[in-house]
Amino acid sequence: MVCKWYYVCPLRQHEKNGKIDVHWAEQYCKSSDGPKKCIRYKLAEDSVYHPDNMLPDGSIDKALS
């Protein structure tokens, strides 16, 4: 099952532009337990701001700014 935020997540655009590897989506967005591990998902569910350059593990990639 794909994460419910998958199609609006800014990381998809970064992936399309070749700025991040597809493993992020495979590990966090498209696996059955991925969203449970995704910090971005947890923050979105709690309506907490998180920057577009935050990766699913919670790290910030300044190259994505």
Image (spheres, grey):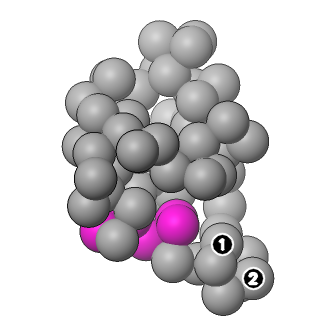
Q: Which residues are magenta?
A: 37-41
User: Residue at (65%, 25%) from the top-left corner?
Assistant: 13
Q: Nearer the viewer, residue 31 or 59?
A: 31
Question: Is disc 1 placed on a helix, strand or loop?
Answer: helix
The number of callouts visible is 2
Q: Amino acid at mark 1?
A: Ala
Q: Which residue is mark 1?
A: 44
Q: Are marks 2 and 1 in contact (CB under 8 Å)?
A: yes
Q: Nearer the viewer, residue 29 or 51?
A: 29
Q: Main secondary structure of the magenta part?
A: helix
Name the spot of residue 54 as percent of width and height, x first: 52, 56
Q: Residues within 10 Å of mark 2 (few under 14, many from 20)?
A: few
Q: Amino acid at mark 2?
A: Ser
User: Residue at (75%, 82%) from the top-left corner?
Assistant: 47
Q: Quadrant of the N terminus?
A: top left
Q: Which mark is residue 3?
A: none
User: Residue at (64%, 52%) from the top-left corner?
Assistant: 5
Q: Which mark is residue 47?
A: 2
- Say whether residue 57 is visible: no
14 over 49 or under it: above or below = above
